[in-house]
Image (tube, rainbow, N blue to C red):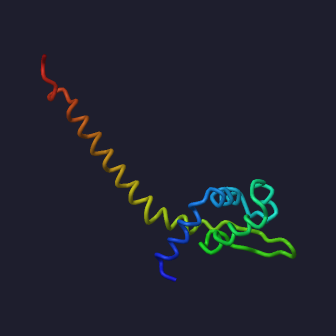
Amino acid sequence: MMVEDQEDMLFKALGHRARRRMLDLMKDGPKTTGALCEALPELDRCTVMQHLRVLEAAGLVIVERCGRERWNHLDALPIHAVHERWIGPYAAYAVNMLNQLKHAVEEDAAPSNIQNI
C-alpha cells in the first residue's frame, strides 16, 4: 500500500468523533469490545465493531483475541508519524515566526526608537 493511501486511511479514521473517543479510551490500556460498547452507549455493538475495523485498517488498533474476548490495543505509532510529518515542522515554523515578531516589537519599543513628543 502506498504511503499516501495509508495516510488517507489514518486521517479518515481520526475524522470521526466516535473513533477518536475510542482511541482516548484505549490510551490508559487495552479495552475489550464490550467495554468500549459500555463506554459508548449511544452506539450499538455493530456500529462499534465497524468503527473498530476502520481503526484497525488504519493501523491505530491492534486486536488480540483471548478466548471469547477481543482486546483492542492502541497503536500510537501512526499518530506519531503524523506529528513528525505535519505538526512538528509547522509548530517549529510558527515558533520561529513568533520569535521574529517578538524581536521586531522589541526593536520598535527600544528607547532609541521612541521619539520625544
Q: Is residue 78 above or below residue 22?
A: below
x, y (%) of residue 48?
73, 64
x, y (%) of residue 81?
50, 68
98 lies left or right of 64: left
Q: Is residue 76 above or below residue 21?
A: below
Which of 110/95 is in front?
A: 95
Single out the residue that lies furthest toward the right.
67
83 lies left or right of 59: left
Single out the residue that lies furthest toward the left.
116
Q: Residue at x 87, y 74 (%)?
A: 68
Which of 92/78 is in front?
A: 78
Single out the residue that lies furthest toward the bottom.
1
Q: Residue at x 70, y 56 (%)?
A: 25
In this rendering, the count of numbered labels is 0
x, y (%) of residue 101?
28, 42
Q: Kindly indicate the quadrant of the structure image that contains residue 77.
A: bottom right
Quadrant location of the C terminus in the rendered image: top left
Q: Is residue 50 above or below residue 16?
A: below
Q: Residue at x 82, y 63 (%)?
A: 34
Q: Residue at x 36, y 51 (%)?
A: 94
x, y (%) of residue 111?
18, 26
